[in-house]
Image (cartoon, grey):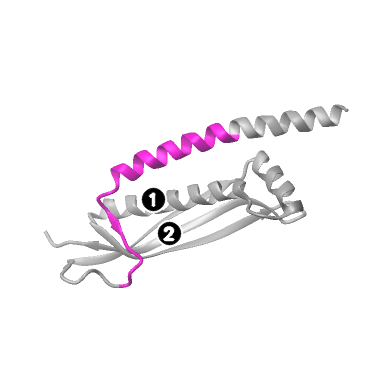
Amino acid sequence: MYDLIIFLTLLTLGYVFGRIAEKRHFKSIIKREEQLRDILTFSERLPAPGFSSARSELVSGNVVISIDYFKRIAAGLRSLIGGRVTAYETLIERARREAILRMKEDARRMGASQIINVKLETASITKGSKDQTGCVEVYAYGTALIQAP
């Protein structure tokens, strides 16, 4: 009985604090996306016809986000019955958006107006004896185009 109370308490705390942290991070992402919306990103390999740049530079952004206790439990329960693991979907979305923002911040420091050939790499970092996912890493990179003055 005591173990069940501890488990439910941890589960509840993981849910509450995980949701608070996630909402706070999404608010930060939305605010920073608004500030960096003038830097355009494209997956195309070449710039648009007519765009001339003085130089190009590699820009990148990297983020590692940990999985909270509740998401780990929810994903474990979902794996028993199958289907979408929505607990991890928001984690991946936050990581991708954050990595792109960090890449854009890198481009802004260089004075770039566009980033072309944008790519995303995702990796899970395992933790524990059962190869449970502990963290998710997303690396965003591309070619920043810096216009001539």
- Look at mark 2 in the image and give the residue it sits on: 140
The mark found on residue 46 in the picture is none
Q: Nearer the viewer, residue 97 or 123?
A: 97
Left or right of 104, for residue 99: right
User: Where's the C terminus, which quadrant?
Assistant: bottom left
- Look at mark 1 in the image and give the residue it sits on: 102
What stretch of residues is rendered in magenta?
A: 18-45
Contact check, label 1 and label 2, Cβ < 8 Å: yes
**Which residue does the image show at 36% across and 66% down from the upper left?**
43
User: Where's the N terminus, which quadrant?
Assistant: top right
Residue type of the residue flagged with mark 2: Ala
Q: Which one is earlier in the sequence, the residue at label 1 or at label 2?
A: 1
Image position of 47 with respect to 90: above or below: below
In the figure, residue 33 lies in which quadrant?
top left
**Which residue does the image show at 43% across and 50% down from the upper left?**
97
| Label 1 CA crowd tier, 10 Å (few <14, some 14–19, many 20+) | many
**C-alpha gap between disc 1 and disc 2:** 8 Å
Where is residue 101? Give x, y as percent.
38, 50
In terms of secondary structure, where does tag 2 sit?
strand
Is residue 33 one of those drawn in magenta?
yes
In terms of secondary structure, where does tag 1 sit?
helix
| Label 2 CA crowd tier, 10 Å (few <14, some 14–19, many 20+) | many
Where is residue 85? Give x, y as percent.
63, 51
Left or right of 138, for residue 131: right
**Which residue does the image show at 60% across and 48% down from the upper left?**
86
Where is residue 89? Give x, y as percent.
56, 50
Magenta segment main secondary structure = helix
**Total marks in image:** 2
**Which residue does the image show at 66% across and 30% down from the upper left?**
13
